[in-house]
Structure formats: structure tokens, C-alpha cells
Amino acid sequence: MELVGETYFNILLNHSFLEKKEGYYVDGIRYKMHDLVHDLAAYILENELLVWKVGSKRVDFSHVRHLVFDLAENESPPETFSHWLTTRKLRTLCFRGSVPSWKNLFGSARFVRVLIMDDLGLTEVPFFIGQLVHLRYLDLSYNDFDILPACICKLYELQTLRIFGCSKLEPLPRELHRLENLRHILTQDTLLASTRLRQLTNLQTLPPLELRDGEGWTIDELGPLDQLKGEVIIRGLQHVKNKEEARQAGLGRKDKIVKLHLQWRDDREAVSQVNNDEDVLDSLEPHSNLQSLYVDMFMGVRFPWWIMTAHMNLVEVRLLRCLRCLELPSLGQLPLLRILMVGMLDDLECIGETFY
């Protein structure tokens, strides 16, 4: 479905129905539509889309499929309005500014597929979200809550969970593996602590992953997730015991991953803790479609051969804090390389001719 959606999106973009919005955004590139296109879309969707503000008047709600509440703080529609949310036609529910204080709000809107509650200043996630059993898309970005309630793990139809900018949020619920239809977990900072990640075989987008010894997930959990794409960040690689365990991640067959960030801990002192770094990195060889590689706190003496393979499509390489490395790999064999960052290689002895 992502490929179909991307095809439609590119058609709109190529015909100037949409245009790129300038600026840097944490959650990716943004686009906007021209005012005339907006007016045309609003005209076409007149009976299906309603943006409700205090003072709005509408008699017939029978055809509305997408509802937006645009409310200032402490504003709320009449409570009698909530009974209309029970309609089976309602598919999208979006809030701007604030959320009505109806106790049965989410219970009434149990047929919605899309719920957007971003940037509302929420300090806790409403428990009644767990009643929206048909929900496919949930956006809770840029709020101040620190925990996702366990009821989220009962939304068995959920495909996309969007939680950008929730800086206080603790690791995601351990029961998240129950959401077997989940395809995208969209965030930058939140860690995933599920111990049964391998059950999410439809997963395409991952948050940063933190390997833990005995209290979190292990790297073999990545093995069955062959649909992963985009960027994958793996931290805590010092917990990988040997190359056989690293090989179970199966990165070599995940051909949709284009960015890979591999990170060890920076507080290892014992030699025994860093002896297997070379074996682990060697066994984490990605597919040749990889475009960006970031290696941080690797304590091996030499990098594996696959970094220097000419058939790799690497455009960007960042090698940082690899304190015991003696020699840089032959990056000159990478024909597409455009961005190179090398820093804090304290033991580096030589940069050979093959480098350039």
C-alpha cells in the first residue's frame, strides 16, 4: 500500500498540486498545496469533510467522513454533539488546539480509522483510545505525556503509530509485539523495549533500538523483519556475544534499508569487552543497496572488508570514536561516495594510497 500511495503522491507533486515546503523538520520533508488547490479540494469534499469551530452550524452530518475539531483552549462543542460520532461512516477524527472534555468521546467514535491528536499539550494519553478497535493510524506527536498506556497494545488493527517530539516518553510498551499489523513506528528518540519484536513481521519503520543484556531485546529479534526500510539505528552492540549471534540479524537480505547506524557503548574498559567487535561488525554486513553508514565507538583494529567493496552503493560514511583503529578502509573504491566524516580515531597509524 505504501508503493501505491507514493505513486499517487508523486503524480500530485509532478503536476504541482503539491509543492515542497522550505525549512528543516524533525519528522521529515513537508509539502503544502496552493490556495487555489485547497479551495478546489474543499469544494469537492464539501459533504465529506467538516472543520468544526465554536459557532459552526451544520444540520446534516450523515455524509461526513472526516471531522476536524478546531478549538481554542477551554472551548468545546455541545455535549449532545457527541452522539453523532457513533456513525459508521466517520473515518477520520482530528483535533486542533484542545480536546473536548466529553467522557464518552472515544467510546462514541469507535468506528474511526484515523485519530490525530498532535501538539495538544497532552500530559497523558486518554485511556479510551483503547476502545477504538478499528484504528489504523494514530498520531500523538509533540505532546508532554511520559508513557503510552497498555491499552494501546489492544489496537490490533493499528498500522501506523506516530510519536515525534514526545521528549518525555519512556520506552514503548513491552506488549507492543501484540500489534502484528503494525507497519510504521515513527519517532526519533523513543526506544523500543519489546522482547518479542520478531512477531512484527509487517514492520517497515523502526525507532532507535537499544540492545540490552537480559532485560530487553537481542539482535536476533531483527531476523524475521525483512520488510524494514529507510533508516535503522542499533545501539548497545557490545551486548552481542559473537559473530553467529550478529549474523542472525539478517541485515544482508534486507534490501530496503538505505541508512544504517551502528553504535557500541563508550565506557568499555576491559579488553575482553572489545575483542569481538571486529567479528560482530563483519557479520552485520548489510545489503549492497545501503547508501549511508554510521559506525560509532567500534573498538576493532581494522574495519571489515565489506565497507571497501566496490559494488556497494555507499554515498555517505561516518566513522567516529573508533579509538583502536589502526588503518582506514580503502574508501577510494566506493565510486558513489560523496560525504565522508572521520573523527576521534586516536590510534590511527596510516592512511594508505588505497584510501584515495
Image (cartoon, helix red, strand yellow):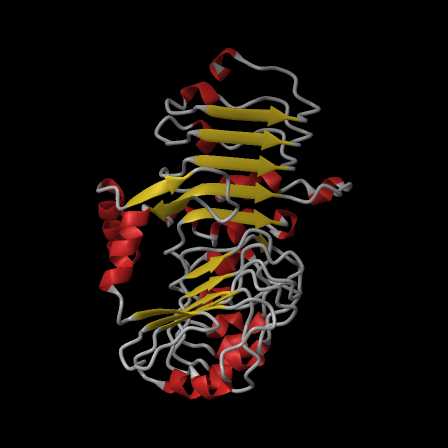
For the point 69% across and 30% down, the residue is 323
Which one is in front, 110 or 247?
110
Above or below 275: residue 47: below
Which one is in front, 344 or 307?
344
Which one is in front, 140 or 199?
140
Residue 349 is situated, as x and y percent measured from the top left of the image, at: 65, 17
Residue 301 is situated, as x and y percent measured from the top left of the image, at: 63, 29
Above or below 311: residue 254: below
Q: Quadrant of residue 209?
A: bottom right
Residue found at the very far top of the displayed protein: 353
Residue 142 is situated, as x and y percent measured from the top left of the image, at: 57, 58
Residue 169 is situated, as x and y percent measured from the top left of the image, at: 64, 62
For the point 28% across and 82% down, the residue is 62
Left or right placement of residue 333 versus residue 152 in this view: left
Q: Does residue 109 appear in this view?
A: yes
Q: Does residue 255 appear in this view?
A: no
For the point 34% across and 74% down, the residue is 91
Residue found at the very far right of the displayed protein: 269
Left or right placement of residue 317 versus residue 170 in this view: left
